[in-house]
Image (tube, rainbow, N blue to C red):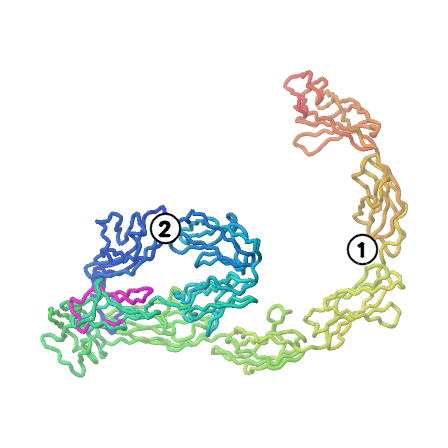
Amino acid sequence: RSQSCPLALCYDNYNHLLSISSFVVESEEFGPVFIQEPDDVIFPLDSDEKKVVMHCEARGNPPPTYSWYINGTQVDSEADYRYTFIDGNLIISNASEITDYGKYQCKAENSIGIVLSRDALLQFAYLGAFSTKARGGVSVREGQGVVLMCTPPPHSPEIIYSWVFNEFPSFVAEDSRRFISQDTGNLYISKVQPSDVGSYICLVKNTVTNARVLSPPTPLTLKTDGVMGEYEPKIEVHFPTSVLVAKGVTVRLECFALGNPVPTITWRKINGNIPKKARLRKSQAVLEIPNIQLEDSGTYECKAENPRGSTAFKGHLQVYTLPQWVRMINDTQMDSGEKLQWECKAIGRPRPTYRWLRNGLPLTSQVPILLHMNGELTIHKVQQADSGMYQCVAENKYAAIYSNAELQILASAPVFLPNPIRVIATLGKDVSLDCKPKASPKPRITWKRGDRRIIPNKRIMLLRNNTLKIVNSSRADEGNYVCRAENQLGSAEMTAILWVKEAMRVVLSPSRVEVTVGESVVLSCKATHDTSLDVAFQWFFNQKPINFQYDGGHFEYIQTQSSTVDLMIRNILLKHAGKYGCRAQTSADTVFAEAELLVRGPPGPPGVVIVEEITDTTATLSWTRGVDNHSPISTYNIQARSPFSLGWQTVKTDPEPVTGDMESAMAVELNPWVEYEFRVVATNAIGTGDPSAPSRGVRTKEAVPSVAPSNVSGGNGRRHELVISWEPVSEEFQNGEGFGYIVAFRANGTRGWKEKMVTSADSTMYKYRDETFPPLTPFEVKVGVYNNKGDGPFSKVVIIHSAEGEPREAPSDVKAYGISSSEIRVTWKSPTPGPGKPRGYEVSYWKDMELEESGKKQQTVKNETSMVLTGLEGNSVYAITVKGFNSIGQGPGSTAVTAKTRKPPPAQPPANLHWLQEGNNVSLSWDPVKAKDNESDVIGYMVLLKQEGRGHNQVTRTINPSTMLSLPEGGTYVIEVRALSEGGEGAFSSQVQLVTSSGVRAKSNQCSVHCLPRSLTWTAILLVLLVPSASW
């Protein structure tokens, strides 16, 4: 099989070595190593769960056993049933502060040694009740300061104080006059006011259990013997003179004073500045410093001041740090007799001291063990008895930290794994035979070949690590070599079998090749080697192995013969240019050959583009050449981009074209006063490359406008107006600041132009009003442009007519007449033709007894001259006017005319319907409808015949209260009848439903929807039913 072996060595027993090594690692014994050490615990005494769990877990081989210590005394679970061990954890049942408060330490032990955990503090959280004894009242003068004492009940740990005023939950609000100390719990009022009179209750909250208790009330009253005068401040609550805090915590320094007027509090740091991160709270009575650091230490002063005087207090803030490891000890294996030197180092404030433990017991400095004050431990000649678990403890007054390590003293006779080994060397090259037995103490090594001991010489050397090195190996060196290792515990031998093979040669062809982007190429790698050895190949690109799965789109590995492989590179890109290497490897030798691939392609991007000079229409540019990718650059293309262009656009240049040997050119025919970016693109015989990075943005200089407005037109407008409109000139062509328009016009046949300035660049219209010119007067009009640099061109002259104006005459011959109870038809004639032609008409109508303003309006859709007004009230007189309108406005209204809607149709529907059917014919009759006085007279009837399932209806009109209907085919029919009048159609009768089969006749006596049917006659198989639609 093919193999890859470093240093020309190949071990047949390599897999065997791995399996043995794995077995050794898995079965190797080691001392306890903590996975979890106990943490500080605060246990609520009122918790439903009455058990405290102190956690401890360690790994080791053999698995560790555990024991626990409370305040240095070992826990005896057999003597006290409250203690239970589960794995390494300690469970305490029915825990109490009296018996269980203190420091806990876990000990893990196996046959290798013992380690102790860090200390963990067990505390108990509780909050007692206030004394129920009534509190005496406090009486002070108005303006005097007062302190109300909280006197909290027993508690652990910290509590939060607040005060209730009169009744819960009305809390005392802290301000510059009132302060609640979280150190003492007292309420301080610097200057009492009448509004302070009342009852005060101290409320405390446990920070762990969230339990709350209220104190008995303390009444506060005012004395009646006068008002307290002004007095200087007196600091009643302040931080201690020496404050000791741990690094990283938030520090709160309190300072509050009584006084009249209310004092103001200020803070400063003596010989330094208060940290920027500090915050003032509670009207400056609290200085809060988060994340305290060593540099925040120092003396702080609070000052209370009012117009009567001032007072100050100083205290020193000192920051301490817990010990932290800088250097820790590590597991160590040594031969007996060697020197052990361990050093552990920690930082902290105060500076930590060191002590050492071995298997949980303190070590003292006595020969052969030396302990140094700086954390060093030295054993000059270690012995088997020194094996075990060591712990370096670094501690100051605030904490102790542990660094653990196992010291293993080795003692074993020499053992070789694997044995024997087979080594294949290359003819003419050096070969090394290793001799690395596992032994302790270190063994003495000798080499022999056959029965003879090897004597080192210039070609065969014994190195310091006991390796036998043979220089310029030859066939004569083949054979068995034996390494013998010996110490006081025993000896062992290892045989190395050496073979020397011919050197391998590798040819990679072609060695240099040029291709163009998109083409493909094949590199062939052929190895000549000893036929008894297998060869393995690997391809490299720029010294990195090729990943054929990742780069499979371009690279393909092809095995042509056992000693030849090809690399096909398809669809070559520029990035594929570089060095390609082929590595051939046997168990005896490794040979590497390289070939160079040059890729011709489009040029790379040119270098930085610099704008050398700028005018109103030109920009002089320079750039640096980019790579030509093995094909000379033929031309450069200059592109520009502005806020008005659609992306990058090619610009004209001087010279034209820009040849590949140039590195500067001028962009011409640019627009003035436009901000441009420029870039350059190179082209060669292969193609066009990527563009350069854009230049910085530059603005061309200002110039007189050169583009006139387009689409000048106009018309419409109000009477005597000339309306002129145009398309505005784009900002791209305004050429400078102060851009505007010049509107010039004159009446046809006149000589002088009127010119008006329009200063807004966005304007699109100008209106000129002159009551002297008649409607539709033709004007010659042109619109020009200007900016701060001067006047630009005018547009072509166009003819625009002045406005014809709104209609000038009212419609004539207006007539109106009622056509039903809710409709009136209105007709009129258009005004005489002329300026102000209507584009439509508006009809206004209102009831005769009402005002015109309360009426309604309707407009024609187009220029019709009639309209039907709908939705009117019956039997009512309406006044009506008509006026024309166009896009300019409305004309005058016509003289009002009146028309009356007709009376409404009868409300009573036809009743007592009778029918007789003969085949497909139905004879139908009903009672006549009589109109009331306020209803229109009946002039006839309408009969509606509907066939269910069909959309078509049959309508029959008759002046008589009867009619004959024809049923086209069998089916279900519905018949309805309604009266007709001048006022419109009356109400429908109730529905009559006929169900018939064609070709069969039947008779029926009278029946209506207002009564039950009296008789039904059946003949043959015909069924005729009258089904009233109303409920029976």
- Residue 387: percent from left, percent from top: 18, 66
Percent coordinates x, y for residue 705 in the rendering: 72, 74
Q: Of the residues shown, which amino acid type is indicated by label 2? A: Pro
Q: Which residue is mark 1?
A: 887
x, y percentage for residue 351? 33, 71
Q: Magenta part of the protein: which range?
A: 375-404
Mark on residue 281? none
Distance from Cα at disc 1 to Cα at disc 2: 87 Å
- Residue plotted at (70% across, 18% down): 1004
Q: Say which element carries label 1.
A: loop
Q: Of residues 50 and 1015, which is closer to you in this image? A: 50
Residue 233 visible at all: yes
Magenta region includes residue 14: no
Given the image, on which type of amino acid does mark 1 rest?
A: Ser
Task: Name the spot of residue 800 as percent of width and height, x first.
Answer: 82, 64
The dot on residue 44 is: 2
Is residue 19 in sight in this rendering? no
Q: Is residue 710 left or right of residue 464?
A: right
In front of the other: label 1 or label 2? 2
Which quadrant would the C terminus be assigned to in this image?
A: top right
Secondary structure found at label 2: strand
Q: Quadrant of residue 979?
A: top right
Left of 38 or right of it: where is 943?
right
Is 382 included in the stretch rendered in magenta? Answer: yes
